Amino acid sequence: MTVLTDSVIYALLAEKGMGPKLYGVFTTGRIEEYVPVRNTLLGLFMSFAIRIKVDIWHTLLWFLVCFCNVGIVFLKKNIFA
């Protein structure tokens, strides 16, 4: 979308109360209302659950890279030497 189309859609949503208020539109951007973030218990729980899954994934990748590659190099040196 172009900047003009994006600004028009944003202005329409702001008028209907479906987004932050629009204070001004310029050629280089726009000024919008600041909406503070609300932390809910569900949001904090989901963040924690995602963090645990990413941590498990990184641990698995670290294990595969460190131990499997070292094991393969060790086997190649001993078997094919």
Image (spheres, rainbow, N blue to C red):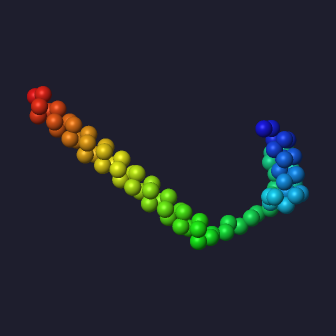
Q: Residue furthest bottom?
A: 41
Residue at image coords 12%, 28%: 80
Q: Nearer the viewer, residue 23 or 77?
A: 77
Q: Is residue 22 visible?
A: no
Please say whether residue 9 is visible from this viewpoint: yes
Counting from the top left corner in percent of width and height, residue 37 is at: 68, 66
Left or right, 69 with respect to 56, comes to: left
Q: Is 54 above or below relative to 38? A: above
Q: Quadrant of the N terminus?
A: top right
10 in relation to 72, above or below: below
Residue at 10% in and 28% down? 81
Is 23 placed left or right of 74 in the picture? right
Residue in the foreground of this view, choosing between 8 and 42: 42
Q: Position of residue 44 (x, y in %)?
A: 56, 67
Q: Residue at x 21, y 37 (%)?
A: 72
Q: Residue at x 11, y 34 (%)?
A: 78
Give the quadrant of residue 32.
bottom right
